[in-house]
Structures are given as structure tokens and as C-alpha cells.
Image: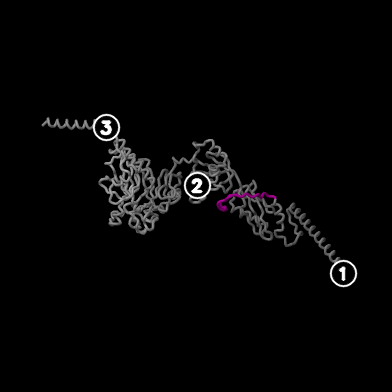
Amino acid sequence: MKNKQILMIILITLFSAINAFAQINQTNTNNTTTNQQTSTQNTYNPNQGNLNLKVNSDAPDLMSQFSSQNSQQRTFAVDKAVNPDLYLIGPNDMFSLGLYGYINQTIPLVVNLEGTLIIPTVGEIKVNGLSLTEAKALVVKAVKKRYYSSEVSLTLSMPRVFLISVLSSVQKKMEVTPLTRPSDIISYIFYDTLDITNTKYRISNPKNEFYPEISLRNIEILRKDGSTVNVDLYRYFSTNDDKYNPYFREGDLLKIPYGMLMKNYITINGAVQLGGIYEYNKNDNLESVIALGRGFDADAETDSITVFRIDPVNSKYQTFNLSYENSKDFKINLYDRVFVKFKTNNIKNLSVVVLGEVNMPGVYPITHKNTTLKEIVDMAGGFKSTAFLPLSILFRSYDEEYTKKDTAEIILNMRANDLIVKEQDKTNFQNDVISRRNRVTVDFEKLFKENDLSQNIILENKDIIYINDDKKIVYVYGQVSNEGYVPYKEGENYEYYISKAGGYSLAAEESDTRIIRFNSRGWYKADKTSVQSGDFIYVPKVVKYSFNENLTLIATLIGTLVSIVSTYLLIKANK
């Protein structure tokens, strides 16, 4: 009996649940039918639903009608937020209308081709040509009249796409948005390798012989209202001011002229980041030209700027000495040359290298034109016991470009020198120029042993000081039987070392034997100079003259002798 009662309770509960579900389903069906009818009639029936829904009660009708509007979203990169005071609205701009209150909902809106926004239950609002700020105020005011208890917002969700004309070496219509700038178009047309027209032109002109250099500073935008906007991309990127790289509007014509850099230029050099020749713009001043050079260098003397201006009458330069802070607005003319002076800076990153027989070899800092050789050796911990001063060397390297030009000038000017008159003189001179070394003449022994301060030279940046050890060898080469290194023996003359090298060869010119010092590379007569450790002994080859050369020499001697005798006899006859 008890089990039957339990079963009965379960059946009653199940039946009640099924009945409730059916009522809920019927209610949803009725609501759907009611919404569809209301949507069709665009009216509100206060007898339907709860009385608390009088405010914004037709929101479902509103939502259902908006759902059919175009809400397709596009995304693209932007460099900054839209300025609502400058953005002008046009057909196909997409907006989002927000209602916040009893019902929170965002509704997509699109400006139609007639330039209006259609808001069901509110009406049609003309927004074409209005700024975003003006349109916001107009729409919010209209919606608030209908939904006075709700908060209302209108935001731009996606800008429209429209066509502009481009006139340059490429002529075409291009799709842009109100957030597109001339810099974007130029990057695409002239520098985008995916642009078919550009790529085809470059392929047909592989040498780019007729490909124009486009202007980046004298671009124009011709507006539909007849006004003209000047575009200067260099100035835009140096100031980030939108007026030099403005946004496009419907009906714009973008004119990109040729650069003509060799006919329309100014120059900026000196203490700037990127000196050179730049395209001129009629609105240039000192500030804009410094910006062309990417700003001042760290060593720039901003109070010492010189502008050189050609005088068309006498073809001479006028000079204007300017201070940047006081003369930013100084007008720069076509062909002006601007030079920014460098500061006299003695605090520079200068250093020398100390190698060899010192206690702490390495790189050491020096000051400009103020650090001596002795000071640096002290900084390096002084000499080791193995240091041998007669073989120590100081190398100095100058600017590579300067060295090349200097060498070329020397070779060029040898024609004007009366010492170079024979082909052998020319050969010898060229060899001497090529073999010039970067050795600095300094006597380490006199400086460090005798304290001769005349040898305490001022060091330059990148000098290399090499403190050698005692090699205890002498190198013998030239016309000897076995050239090579011979162990040094103190007190012995050059003949000792030549004998150790196997003696003179058959072709040796013994009388012209020379001793060459390791340090200075100076050449000395062997019989008048002692041999030191590290020296070189060179034995030259006998010079043999050909028959013609001997005949010429004999004829010259005979001619000279005849002249002397004739002169003597003439003088004697006169007496």
C-alpha cells in the first residue's frame, strides 16, 4: 500500500512538470508572434507584457530591424585615434549605436548612399559632411527623444572606402579611407613590389634610365572645393604634424611631381646626424632644414650655424651667422648651404695600445694633445727586465682616406720635382712612397735612460707602442751565400756576420754593404757603423752596364775631357 502511494506521488509530479513545460513553450510562441506583429505595425500595445516595460518596451522591435543592416567589419592599421572634430562623415561609414539602461544593447548602423542614418522607431538623420562630433550630438539628441530614460552613444566602428585620383608617373584611381595619408599612397605606388604597374615598368626599364625620382616635399592635394593642400613628408616625419601629411577626402586629386633634385635643392652639412643634399621646399626655414639632417650631432655648436647664399649678380656667397634658438624661423632659399660647426671638444674617447715587454700591456686612455709617451709607459706598469729599448717602436696611423689622397698627391707632384729626371729616379721614388711606414722617430734609450724630454712626444689616438725584447740576432741578406739570421755577438763588426752567412757571393758589391737599423730603418755605411742587436746587414749586387751604356759613358768622359783641354788652351793663348 505504501509503495502504491509513493508511485502515485511520482506520477502526479511528472504530470505537473510536463504541463508546466507546455505552458512555457506556449508563452514563448505567443511572445514571438506578438513581436513579429509589433515589428510589422511599428506600434506599442501597453496591454501586452508587464506594465514595468513601458520604458524602452519596443527595444526588441528595434533590435530585430537593425539586425538586417550591413554590419560587416574590416580591420586595418591606424597610427592614432580618430580626431572627432576633423573626421567628416560620408556614405558607408559604419557606426555602433549604444543604448544603456533597462536594456543594454549595441546596434550596428551604416550611412546609406544618400548620406543618412536610418534608425527605426527614431527616424532618418542626415549626417553626410558633418564632423564626427556634430553627428554624435545630432544622433544622440534624436534617440534620446524616443528613449529618454536611456543613456545613448554613437561611435565610429569602421571608416568608409572611397576613390581618389593619383596624377604622377602613374595615373590611376585608388581606394582609400578617411584615415589614409599621401605617405601610404606613395609607399604603395612607387615602393611596393606587389604593384603590378610599377613592377612591369621596372622590368621593361631594367636600368631605370627613365624612371623619375619622385618629390617627397612638394606634393599637392587638390580638394573638390578648389582648395590646395601642400604635403611635405620629410617635415611630417620630423614634426608628426598632420598638416604636412593630411588625410584624404572624397574627390581629392593627389599630384606627385618629379623630384628634380639637381635643380631644386639645398644642402645641410657639419655637425648633423645625416648631412647631404635635400629637396627644397618654398616654406623651408632653419628649423626644417636642421630636421632634414635628422637633428644635431652630439658635438654640434648650435650657436654657430652659417648659411652660405649665392648672389646671382656677382656669383659670390653671402654668409649669415645664426644661432638656432634665436633663428629657427630664418628663411632658407633655393641653393642655400647650411653648415653647423662642431664644438671644440677635448674630452674624447681617445686611446693608445701598449704591447710587448711591459708589466701590464693593453689599451690605455689618453687626452687630446696632452698625454706623453712616458706617462703611458708608467700607466702600463713600466718595463719588464726583458725590455730592450733600442728595438722599441712607436707606430702612428692616420686616417685611411687622408693617407690615400696624400700618397696620390705626392706621386702626382713628382713631375714638377727637378730631382726626378730619369726613369730610375721615378722607380726609386715610387718605391719610397709605397714603402713609407708609420714609424715615429723617437729614441727610447735617451728618454728613459738619460731622461731626455725632447724624446717625450705627445701621443695621438690609436698610436701603438711596442716595447721589444732583445732579439740577439742580426739578419744578413742580399749577395751572401746563406742569407738569414745570425746570432748577435757584441763587439763584432759587419764582416763577422757576413762570414757567418757564408761570405760574399760572386755578384756582391762589397764596398756598398749597408747596416740598416731595426728601429729607424736608416741605412748606414758598414765600415763606419757598429752592428747592434736586431740590425739588418744588406749586401747589394754589382751593377753591370751594357756595351751601349759603357760607350755612352766613355763618350761623355772624352767630351768632358776635350772641353777642359780646349778651355785651358784658349785661356793660355789669350795670356
Task: Characterize the local packing of mark 2: few (<14), some (14-19) or many (20 or more) Cα atoms within 10 angstroms.
Answer: some
Which residue is the site of mark 3?
A: 550
The answer to whether residue 391 is left or right of residue 291 is: left
Q: Element at badge 3?
A: helix
Question: Badge 2 is on which residue?
Answer: 233
- Residue 263 is situated, as x and y percent measured from the top left of the image, at 44, 40
Front label number (3 vs 2): 3
| Chain-order first, disc 3 or disc 2 | 2
List x then y, in percent, for residue 241: 50, 51
Q: Secondary structure at mark 1?
A: helix
Residue range in magenta is 68-89
Gap between marks 3 and 1 measured at Cα: 154 Å
Q: Amino acid at mark 3?
A: Asn
**Residue toward you, 128 or 210:** 210
The N terminus, quarter of image: bottom right
Q: Which image quarter: residue 318?
A: top left
In magenta stretch: residue 72: yes
Alpha-carbon span between mark 3 and mark 2: 78 Å
The colour style of the image is one colour
Q: How far from the left and from the top, in percent, is residue 291?
A: 45, 50
Q: Earlier in the sequence, mark 2 or mark 1?
A: 1
Q: Is residue 20 above or below residue 172?
A: below
Q: Position of residue 174 (x, y in %)?
A: 58, 42
Q: Amino acid at mark 1?
A: Lys
Work out whether residue 432 can be spotted: no
In the image: residue 464, left or right of residue 450: right
Distance (Cα) linking label 2 and label 1: 94 Å
Circle nearer the viewer, 3 or 1: 3
- Residue furthest to the left: 575
Q: Which residue is mark 1?
A: 2
Quarter holding the C terminus is top left
